[in-house]
Image: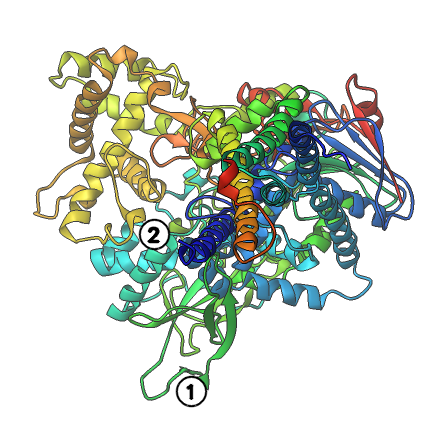
Amino acid sequence: MKARRPALAVLNALASVIVLGGVLYAGASGAGPLPPLGAMLNPGTGVWTVAGDARPPSNQTLQLPGLTQGVHVIYEPNGTAHIEAGTDHDLFLAFGYVHATFRLFQMDLQRRQAEGLLSQIVGPEALNSDEFELQLGLVRTAQAEWSAMPANDPARLALTAYTTGVNAAMAEQERTGHLDVLFKMLGYQPTPWTPLDSLAIQGIMTQTLDFSDGPLWYALLDKALGYDRLMRWLPVIPADESIQRPYDPGPYRQDPAAPFDAAPTAQAVSPGAATAAAALEARMAALPPGAVHREADSNNWAVNGPKTASGGALLAGDPHLDQTLPAIWYQVQCDSPGFHVAGVSIPGIPGILIGHNQHIGWSLTNTQNAATFYYQEHTDKAHRNQYFWNGAWRTMKSVQYAIPVKHGAAVDFTVKMTVHGPVMMEIGTAFAVWWAGALPSSDIDALYGVNRASTYQQFRDALRVWHAPTQNFVYADDQGNIGLISAGYFPLVKSGQPWLPLPGDGSADVTGTIPFDDLPQVYDPPSHMVWSANQREVGADYPYYIGTSLEFFDPGYRAGRIYQVLSNGKNLTTNDMERLQNDTHDYLAGLIVPKLVAALQGQPMSANEQTAKALLGEWDDDMQPDSAAATVWMRFWTQYLYDTFNPWWTAQKVPTKQDPGLALEPDKTGDLTSPLGESLVQWTVNDPTAADFTLPNGTVRTAPEVMRAAFAEAVTALTKRLGPDPKSWTWGRVHSRAFPNLAQIDSLGYGPRPAGGNGWTVDAASDTEFVSTHGPSWRMVVDWSAGMAYGVYPGGQSENPLSPWYENQIPAWWDGRYNPMLDASQAQSLPGSQTWTIQP
Amino acid sequence: MKRIPQSMALAAAIVVGIVVVWAANHFGLWWVTALVGVAIGVAFRGTLKILGVASLVAVAAWGLDLAFQSLSQPLGAAATTVAGIMGFGQVGAIVVALALVFAWLLGAAGAWVGAAARRAVHTFGRRSAPLTSRA
């Protein structure tokens, strides 16, 4: 017995230490799918602080090191912040503090995506995203932008002050154990903020709006369908270009620059290029939402003079982006010696992107122009790590990264660079990508120029240094002037067809950009209205190439509806602007439904088909949730598109399995619905016997024949899905909106809820499966004659899911209501407003 | 010198332990729960007693803290939110239970280490009564 006792004691001690060690390890580092339980669950500083942190700010005095004077931050009861500072430095310092107080996790997540650091917090499943972003090079661009800023550059000074404010809030949250709940659940603490992080977030926004894969799709479709058919179906300039309603009808300037060759000869896509395109597309399909630009985003317009009831200028803007919780926007009003500006900011970036100051208002839509070119580099095995360019072999530059991975070793990653840009794929052929967003862009300086401008000339001059993402800036001022300008890089290539992968031998390199004075722009036009809705900004006679239908220029349905309402409008008021922003009339339906009804006239039909036809005949094209005709229309349209093109997709083996984005479905809208639909509209309206309706086996069809068949199929499918009574097939039964959580946590999202609209209505509800998560992310109307502005966004000011400010603005947004954009004194007088007095 | 009655010592250990764990948690020092368990394991005899006291201290310190906070804050909603994030649906009670189970594990495992250390010391010749003899 005695001999066993020491051994048992040792074993007992060892076992106890092992068990305690395991519990401590699980507490500190997590175990398997479990997060670090100790830091996460302890009652003092664990996830429970989310409850106390949810309380809105109260009247209190705070200390903020780095301030030179006192600052006031006034919070309206709905969360809108007003920062009053005695110096510009203090304004931006407080700006950073406020952003980080309410959106630190969002800011950290965004910078991590941009900088290829997601794997560090979520594990190897994010490696594809991290590698892609490191290849694309947002960090390299941010470094170049920061290095290029002189010491006294306003943007540099603002970024420095902003960074101090962010880090003060971060340190305070860490010290008191009040970091956001998701930091605790993921088991990490944020690293200090730097100005590069803000510039990287600027980069990720640019990527969302500007980085496209159109040439890869052209390469894949060219290989499957053949060049002639492809260019007939997805042309550079649509056959019926009038529907696009360009806002700048010309006449146009053409200054010395490499013009686009309007009638190029066919450019072969090599098998290697198609293989590389398919492989790269497969990678892109696995990226987080918004990493590749495939949407038409946003509306803006302005009217003045005789169009308005007051004679002054009215401006409206609603940028369409992924609708998430927390929202992309943080609403704020800033007052300092240099800035008197109100609107929406992006957490992580010190500035008002869309808003107004005391004299002018502005809003943005995406130009959709071609900004991404893919180059097939000439490489061979005899010249390792080299490429042939301008008559000689050149050595690729390389940049080494070590990607930290949660619960694992860092992954070494090398990015190779040619003169065109980073090599994104080396399967089949080496693909390098030239992207305008990779060039340094002084967006923050431009923004400050816009923020301070009081005339169109100052506004326009400020935008000279805005390079990417290229945006349509609408303008209206307190003197009754209006304007619109498409600012940013519109790159031009030496030769070739830039919608396809280009040869990397130097013959098709980017030579420059369209000169600023030649960009699409109008000022105080005789029509007294300017408008953009991602349609092609210029007519077919514009002397420069700006992109094809696969850049996702809106086919003009939103622009057409806006034009229709504004051109017919008289005595327009703020209410009219708000009504138009919430308009759900489908302009496309207005073009096609009469053709469909005519095609069905006198044809034998089932009872349900007759009822469905009657619904369409009485319909006013409004995609309201209670409209059964809206459901019939949309189901018909997707079926019609499918019946027209999919036989060719099948016969010619379009690689939809490798790239699901290329797939066509009879009951869904998809990425190709709008660009292919543009051609289908043209044939249906102007050329119903077009050869394009003919099947691959030679069977000749006409538009009315295909429409009748598609209508019958649609009614059969709807009967099966929604029941026998067509009058009960309301749009809200099949179409909804949802606002998912930014970190893709289902329980922190909102909806889905039945909703009206579709991807082509002014109140856009873009979707792929009739659940829209993309649309108006901010609605703003500025009435300069009344000196009032109104705005609302679907979300709330706080990222804390328990905060009353997490989603408090959704009901107003949903109902089409707006909040007045108050100044600080008005805000302070509101019952329930609270003020932070912040001392140095 | 008068010996402190065992029951008073136990009561004092429970109160002090709860206060220490409670306070430590508010500095983010969640692992102090295990240290308190170790101290209890070293200080008292009897396996069941030690485990019982350490578990009581740990669970009470964490549980009472949560209960106290819930009087002024929506802790139930916080638990529901966290449950949703963890994929437990809307069942916040799971998160509360997980917290208490984790606290218990810390306290009990700490106590085991303390008791085992004391026993090892005794076994290798120090003056001490066999741990199991008082169980």
* Image quadrant assignment for residue A684: top left
Residue A480 versus residue A390: which sits nearer the camera?
A390
In the rendered view, does A804 fall on the left or right side of A436? Answer: right
User: At 29% across and 48% down in the image, what residue appears?
Assistant: A660
Q: Which residue is mark 2?
A: A235
Report the Cα–Cα distance between label 1 and label 2.
33 Å
The amino acid on which the numbered mark 2 sits, given as a three-letter code, is Pro
Please determine whether, in this image, residue A188 is positioned above or below residue A428. Answer: above
The amino acid on which the numbered mark 1 sits, given as a three-letter code, is Gly
Give the number of the disc on residue A391: 1
First-in-chain label (1 vs 2): 2
Please determine whether, in this image, residue A529 is positioned above or below residue A500. Answer: above
Q: Position of residue A691 (x, y in %)?
A: 18, 45
Please determine whether, in this image, residue A573 is positioned above or below residue A511. Answer: above
- Residue A366, visible in the rendered structure: no
Is label 1 on the same chain as label 2? Answer: yes
In the rendered view, does A42 fall on the left or right side of A634? Answer: right
In the rendered view, does A266 fall on the left or right side of A759? Answer: left
User: At 34% across and 57% down in the image, what residue appears?
Assistant: A281
Please determine whether, in this image, residue A503 is positioned above or below residue A255. Answer: below
Residue A223 versus residue B96: which sits nearer the camera?
B96
Q: Position of residue A488 (x, y in %)?
A: 60, 55
Quadrant housing the C terminus of chain A:
top right
